Image (tube, rainbow, N blue to C red):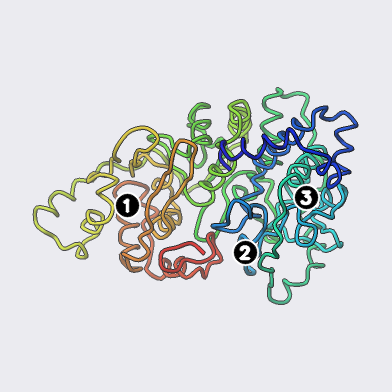
Amino acid sequence: MNNKHLLAALLPLVFATSAFADSTADSAALIKRGAYLERGAYLERGAYLATAADCTACHTAPGAAKNAEFGGGYPLASPFGVIYGTNISSDKQFGIGSWSDDEFVRAVRDGVGKDGQQLYPAMPYDSFTKMKRDDVLAIKAYLMSLPGVHEAPAKTDLSFPFNQRWGMTFWKWFNFDKGELKSDPSKSDDWNRGRYLVDAMEHCGTCHTPRTLTMGMDNGKTLGGGDLGSWKAFNITSDKNAGIGNWSQQELVTYLKTGFVAGKASASGAMAEAIEHSLQHLTDADLNAIATYVRSVPPVADKDQTKPRDQWGKPASDVFPDRANAVAFDKSASALFNSNCAACHGASGQGIGKGFHAYPSLYNHTSTGAADSRNLVAVILTGVQRHMDQGEVMMPSFANQLNDEQVAQIANYVSTQFGNPAGATVTAKQVKKVRDGEDRSYPPKIEDGTQK
């Protein structure tokens, strides 16, 4: 939701009529208790928190119309099958229109549905459990103020035994630490606010913290990097080589706001979506609080990262000779790069342009400088798209133009020439797995160059 859409949604809410009070009696009572004296301010707060929690990302189907927002249907891939986001609109039949406050809070913070069914942890209640009850109810009030989506989303239908939701009870015994996050009085208000945003609202650990054998977050390696199938959620601890320990406060804030820092990184995959739907809309104060907290997280080292990911690589020198010698586009990796990548990223891989709409350099980049090259392969196959307040950021998918062997060649060439040579181990077989979605990755499936 961009700022224009957010403003359009909020203006009528300030002047909401008694119909709102009737449909959200419990949450309205919270207002009367003095948590928020102005109904408009309360709903605005709920809208902001829903954005911070990135509710639309999982609860809105890809390509859904504006009036179908929060109607569910987004496919979330897992090692056990596809889990579909539920309808959390105000519709009484298919959404949460008939839910009480306690039922909604129990679902968000405890992972238990209205009828007592255990929710799959694709709903990150292991992070949301840390949210304040008042914040959860402000989100509910905002959702209830919007038109309902009278449609049932695709139904999650996992194979046995994963379709037995009661089994989540055992998962919770091992992995679920229930309870609201408490402030640390020894830390600054900025740090505590940042921790609340990172650990609870933005649920960053869901992707960026590695998982244990029972698929719970490994809190001994908080934010040390997560496995998302064909994508890698990078280490964002204070480690200077594997993490972001060499980033400045302003660089991190700029990245969270725009998805791009020249000479550092550009966002793709799930991170691009998090920035598009959530992070870019947060206040500068909250982004600074996030940066303050993340930069304080204890370092988690990685023996495969021997220097900072943004300090690998050098300009290419073989593209111009290939052109002069008219090397066929499919006869060498550098020729493949020349034919498919050089027009935007430069013949030497130096990037083209400056500022927000620049095509990034392929050297001095945290993705190409990673020992794990999964993100590089995934970007070639799926492209990049970020709908930003400042404009559109787009790289096309090359899934139709390149076969599996050619994708592997380009990925290995980019890693060797512009990044960390340790990542130059991609095979055509691995590319095919990503293309076919066999690794249960994000996105679930690539067909004809599109995300499904």
Residue 370, position in %: x, y?
43, 48
Say which amino acid is labelled 2: Ser
Residue 189, position in %: x, y?
71, 23
Crowdedness near tag 3: few (<14), some (14–19) or many (≥20) residues, C-alpha within 10 Å: many
Residue 362, position in %: x, y?
33, 44
Crowdedness near tag 1: few (<14), some (14–19) or many (≥20) residues, C-alpha within 10 Å: many
Q: Which residue is mark 1?
A: 414
Please tell me which residue lies in front, 255 or 186: 255
In the rendered view, would you say 135 is above or below 292? below
Q: Residue at x 43, y 43 (%)?
A: 392
Res 56 label: none
Q: Residue at x 38, y 35 (%)?
A: 263
Res 78 label: 2
Please tell me which residue lies in front, 218 or 449: 449
Please tell me which residue lies in front, 370 or 306: 370
In the rendered view, would you say 251 is above or below 418? above
Instruction: Please tell me whether mark 3 sits on a helix, a strand or a loop.
Output: helix
Tell me the quarter of the picture where residue 301 sits.
top right
Q: Earlier in the sequence, mark 1 or mark 3?
A: 3
Q: Residue at x 60, y 63 (%)?
A: 77
